[in-house]
Amino acid sequence: MMRVLVFNCGSSSLKFDFIELDASGVSGRSLGHGLFEEIGRPASGNRRLVDAFGAVHEQAGRIANHPTAALEAIAALESAHSESPLRPDVIAHRFVHGGPDLTAPAIADEKLLKALEAASVFDPLHYPASIATLRAVAVRLPQTPAVVIADTVFHRTIPEWVRDYALPRALAARHRIHRYGFHGPAHAWMMERYAELKGVRTSAVNLITLQLGAGCSATAIRNGVSIDTSMGLTPLEGLMMATRSGDLDPAIVSFLVEREGITAAKVVEMLNHECGLRGVSGVSNDLREIEAAARAGNRDAALAIRMFCYRVRKYIGAYLAALGGADAIVFGGGIGEHSAAVRAEICAGLKPLGIELDRARNQRAVGREERISADGASVEAYVIPVNEELYMARVAARVIAADRSIV
């Protein structure tokens, strides 16, 4: 049995979960989890803690920064468990970008932290908060080892002819420019859970995993490893997302710089925060609000949904070709887990490729794990709700166990 305290930093949010793993290191129960939102904003932030008994505690009030939120989380867990101090066996920290040198989950020491700080050029939005949080928690719980789990690590297996961009080789090498991929814990969770459901090893599965939420990405998995993914050097590439544009002609950047009289940095900011579902619909970045507007006759809202689904469908077709066929496609993330209508539209017309949904199963699978493909479909379809925190707890426990066995 091992207790893992998990921290998952977003740009303005922090999720945490205190998980007790059973002896197998696979299953676990939450001893308390929560979410801090609107961190660092002038207006009030929001705190939400769910204790081990399922009771929900919410509080509003400004949250200065991510380290403050993490220390509040520890204090809240101590209060809920009447333990002083809190005694996790290991702490897991999610980093969005591992940089070019982090090839596996690793125990955080000063050498690793310096390498991560040097890699902050690849992710200036998340790195300062993630590193500051890790350091603050280390001071608060100095005897507890910490493990860094980066999104990009899962995609280190992508072959170079897929990973590399068609840039001059020396230029790309000088700046370490290539496809890194993101959402690693989500794609890894869907793969591992699918293998558990089928009773096979992960090395035996070939999947297309779809993480569809505020951020969206698709991954092609062959024999249990990532061979292609839609996000690239940054999370901006690939599928259309809540506020990100996804794939576009790169010349649009210079075109807008010239025509709008703005900087390239401003264009990139717009592509990250003002495009995607929000930009096309003109309504919201929340799919539920866009679907309601489309039902009410809003043409731009309907167009946004159609564009979103088409682009996912196109990636499915491309990845079926890259894999030479797949065992299943797996839907995860807020949209992927909860919108039966979007799943149905994404898969519409894919019957010649072996993909066909069962309408009743698809309608029933809202936020729940279920096979949604029709009987007889050669490519299965599943909804598998993503549990990044449990995945990270499993990984951190394995890293610590391996380190102790070496010692």
Image (cartoon, rainbow, N blue to C red):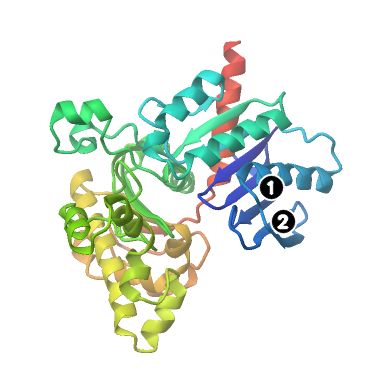
Q: Which residue is mark 2?
A: 50
Taking the spot 31% from the left edge, 61% from the top edge, the residue there is 240
Q: Does residue 394 appear in this view?
A: no
Precedes in sequence: disc 1 or disc 2: 1
Taking the spot 56% from the left edge, 21% from the top edge, the residue there is 109
Q: Could you say which is closer to the camera, residue 214 or residue 39?
A: 39
Disc 1 vs disc 2: which is toward the camera?
Answer: 2
- Check contact, mark 1 vs mark 2: CB within 8 A: yes
- Horizontal side of residue 191 vs 11, given as left or right: left
- Horizontal side of residue 142 vs 401, given as left or right: right
Residue 37 appears in which quarter of the rendering?
bottom right
- Horizontal side of residue 111 vs 140, given as left or right: left
Three-letter code for the amino acid on which mark 1 is drawn: Ser
Q: CA distance from mark 1 to mark 2?
A: 9 Å
Instruction: Indicate the quadrant containing the C terminus: top left, top right, bottom left or bottom right.
Output: top right
Three-letter code for the amino acid on which mark 2 is drawn: Val
Instruction: Indicate the quadrant containing the N terminus: top left, top right, bottom left or bottom right.
Output: top right
Taking the spot 83% from the left edge, 46% from the top edge, the residue there is 79
Q: What secondary structure is found at the residue carrying circle 2?
A: strand
Note whether 233 is above or below 36 in the view shown.
above
Where is residue 108 shown, x and y percent of the image? Answer: 56, 25
Note whether 315 is above or below 100 in the view shown.
below
Q: Which residue is mark 1?
A: 30
- Horizontal side of residue 90 vs 189, given as left or right: right
